[in-house]
Image: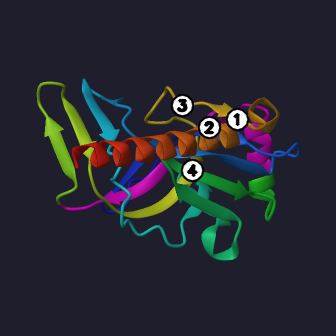
């Protein structure tokens, strides 16, 4: 995988969408999980690392290179930060390479993903005790890509038939937890007075 400028590339979970395999969705990154970057060093993404990041016109590619298969500016790629991480949904039907990639994802020939980004100059914290770097501030997200060999071997790809409703259920549960947390904060604040 080519590395350009000071861009960083990381793995993520992706799930194939509709039965034709041309719509895929998943998480470009998840927050808080440390993954092995090699040589005993680990990395994790802080839950607020994407606050204020430039995520304009992110593209979807294969191995961070070649033809663009989906892109935000034409509505074929949607990205959203939620409590779990950076959620993406891409329609790969617009070109033959995208349809081929969708088919490979559907058939589990491509099982992992990565994302390309630039960390802010002061966007790292390092803990020598755990040998873990935490990305605290991302300046720009460039792409989300299906990859042959990911940085994070623990990610997975699933067909939509496996995940029907799972992502939406997780989002509902997350929203309910956030509402409950807010109610508890309000109740705690009222108890102080």
Identify residue for label 2. Answer: 170
Q: Nearer the viewer, mark 4 or mark 2?
A: 2
Q: Which residue is at 79% across, 49% downward?
A: 100
The reply, left or right, for residue 109 in relation to residue 140 is right
CA gap, disc 3 and disc 2: 17 Å
Q: Residues within 10 Å of mark 1 (few under 14, many from 20)?
A: few
Identify residue for label 1. Answer: 166
**Discs 1, 3 touching: Cβ within 8 Å:** no
Q: Nearer the viewer, residue 89 or 60?
A: 89
**Discs 2, 1 touching: Cβ within 8 Å:** yes
Identify residue for label 4. Answer: 87
Residue 66 % position (x, y): 60, 60
Mark seen at residue 155:
3
CA gap, disc 1 and disc 3: 16 Å
The quadrant where residue 79 appears: bottom right
Residue 39 % position (x, y): 25, 25
Magenta run includes residue 111: yes
């Amino acid at each position: 995988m080519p590395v350009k400028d000071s861009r960083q590339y990381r793995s993520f979970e992706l799930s194939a969408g509709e039965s034709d395999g041309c719509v895929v969705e998943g998480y470009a990154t998840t927050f808080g999980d440390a993954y092995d970057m090699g040589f005993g060093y680990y990395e994790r993404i802080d839950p607020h690392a994407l606050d204020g990041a430039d995520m304009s016109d992110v593209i979807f590619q294969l191995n961070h290179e070649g033809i663009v298969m989906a892109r935000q500016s034409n509505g074929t790629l949607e990205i959203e930060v939620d409590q779990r991480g950076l959620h993406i949904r891409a329609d790969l039907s617009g070109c033959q390479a995208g349809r081929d990639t969708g088919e490979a994802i559907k058939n589990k020939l491509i099982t992992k993903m990565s994302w390309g980004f630039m960390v802010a100059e002061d966007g790292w914290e390092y803990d020598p005790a755990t040998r873990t770097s935490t990305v605290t501030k991302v300046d720009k997200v460039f792409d989300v890509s299906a990859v042959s060999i990911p940085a994070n071997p623990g990610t997975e790809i699933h067909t939509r038939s496996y995940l029907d409703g799972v992502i939406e259920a997780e989002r509902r549960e997350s929203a309910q937890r956030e509402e409950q947390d807010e109610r508890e904060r309000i109740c705690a604040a009222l108890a102080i007075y």
